[in-house]
Image (cartoon, grey):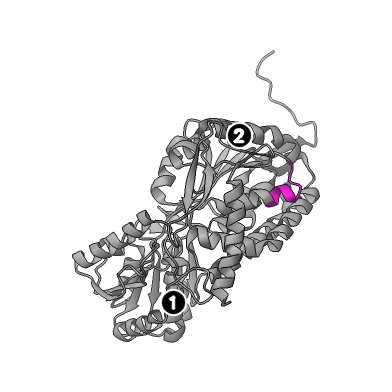
Amino acid sequence: MNALSENLAKAEAHLDRILGNGVMNLVGGERIPAIDGTSFETLSPVDLRPIAKVAHGKAADIDRAARAARSAFPEWAAMKGTTRRALLHRLANRIEERADEIALVECMDTGQALRFMSKAALRGAENFRFFADRAPEARDGTVTRTEGQVNMTSRFPIGPVGVITPWNTPFMLSTWKIAPALAAGCTVVHKPAELSPLTASLLAEISEESGLPPGVLNVVNGFGEDAGAALTEHPEIRAIGFVGESGTGSQIMRQGADTLKRVHFELGGKNPVVVFADADIERAADAVVFMIFSLNGERCTSSSRLIVDRRIHDDFVELVKRKSRGIKVGHPLDPETVVGPLIDPGHQRKVLDYIEIGKGEGARLALGGKVAGDAGCYVEPTLFVDARPEMRIAREEIFGPVLTVIPFDDEGEALDLANDVAYGLSGYVWTSDVTRAFRFSENLDVGMVWVNSENVRHLPTPFGGTKASGIGRDGGDWSFDFYMETRNVAFATSAHRIPKLGG
């Protein structure tokens, strides 16, 4: 039995269990169907066959979950940080024990390649460990003294929160939001993406196995127009953490306005990778190919715009083409696969439409651009050259394996090209000139910059974007800033004179 057959057999065994049980909602510690008994099917993008029936939650289900989260909140918020830390470490242990199952199921549910999802599952455990270790100090604040007064500033959990996660790497991104919320002392109602709900169900199972109290983590499956809208509008939910596209973020902000919800948005990107003539060309090309074609190009930080010095343009493009030709497109459970199927036929059609738009706008298709295979939602790694900055393929988020190349003549033009889009999530700069690297990075209108590197995340550092790419920052204490309120208590230290207004 080869590696693909072996992985497929394991995945089928896990999926058979899920198919037999169905995907239920988790509310108040109970696995339950939707209140009205309805469900929907989730399909595998590998071959479009149904994987499981999923409970179709709506407003009544969200209401039940929000009330469960509110009921569980006082005890969870009052729990010692050391106790929460122990519980979350236990949860991380269970994630590690079931990491193979999580990765295999996620591959079949999303189409992402196993070589990436195996790491993403373990990253979920790392997220829980990182924030668990900060739980005991999450409320710590500062003490300042002024004349006649001592100010004690501390933090406390904001209350029940809603978490809405995307379909591209759902397990890792769910833990990225849920772990700090729980560590801070918040309770959670999680609405997973309807296109890839399976590993959220596994996380719910793991939370129960780990002894998380009932109602602390609730999961309601459904669609944006029913479950999602109800969550963002519910008065018991104090904040919404959302990862997804920018248009949906705007809609969530409107829906949460009446209840004055705090929002944290990690949204889309049209991220530039700027390559100067003095860069390490071989490493830069490897990074460019990795950041656009790993995870099927379905990642918010993908370097989808290659802005390259005209002096090396032709040679660099040829190098990128050569490295891209060696990429294996295939079944996500094949260890050699880099690009698997896109999430569903609708998204495949969107990506193919953008390829036609690019050709129609006059860009030259230098690589790929077609459907790959006879089944599933596969698209070849695609490269456009001779592009202009006003083209839609150079300005709009495609969220697929499509790279657009634009040349520049000098540093000023490169900076203008990099900043001249609605998005500002991340940027990548390749140069051997340290002074230029500092200067250019400081002037990029983005939330994160990697210099001479692909996207390598360090959990204590802030993650987030500017403009249409989001609001707020994740990572380190920045996550706690979102999930916690700040309180100041001022103590008088002397009998200072209080102004009299009458008498």
492 or 139, nearer to the observer: 139
The amino acid sitting under disc 2 is: Ala
**Which residue occupies the foreground of this view, 335 or 232?**
335
Residue beneath the point at 73% across and 35% down: 74
Q: Give the residues drawn in magenta, as a range.
A: 206-213
Residue 102: x percent and y percent?
Answer: 61, 60
SS category of the residue bearing label 2: helix
Direction from residue 19 to residue 226 in the image, left or right: left
Q: Amino acid at mark 1?
A: Lys
Residue 463 drawn above or below residue 382: above
As drawn, the label of residue 17 is: none
Q: Would you identify the image quadrant in which residue 409 lies?
A: bottom left
- The residue indicated by pointer 2 is 66
Q: Residue 123: x, y in percent?
A: 62, 63
- Residue 275 located within the stretch drawn in magenta: no
Q: Is residue 29 visible?
A: yes
Residue 140, can we see it?
no
Vertical side of 366 occupied by 40: above or below: above
Residue visible at 44% across and 86% down in the picture: 282
User: In the rendering, which numbered label is found on residue 328?
Assistant: 1
Q: How many numbered discs, if any?
A: 2
Q: Percent from the top left, x then y, of residue 305?
A: 35, 69
Q: Is residue 212 magenta?
A: yes
Q: Secondary structure at mark 1?
A: loop
Furthest toward the top, the residue is 503
Left or right of 152 on screen, residue 239: left
Q: Is residue 292 above or below residue 198?
A: below
Residue at x 41% of width, y 56% of height: 344
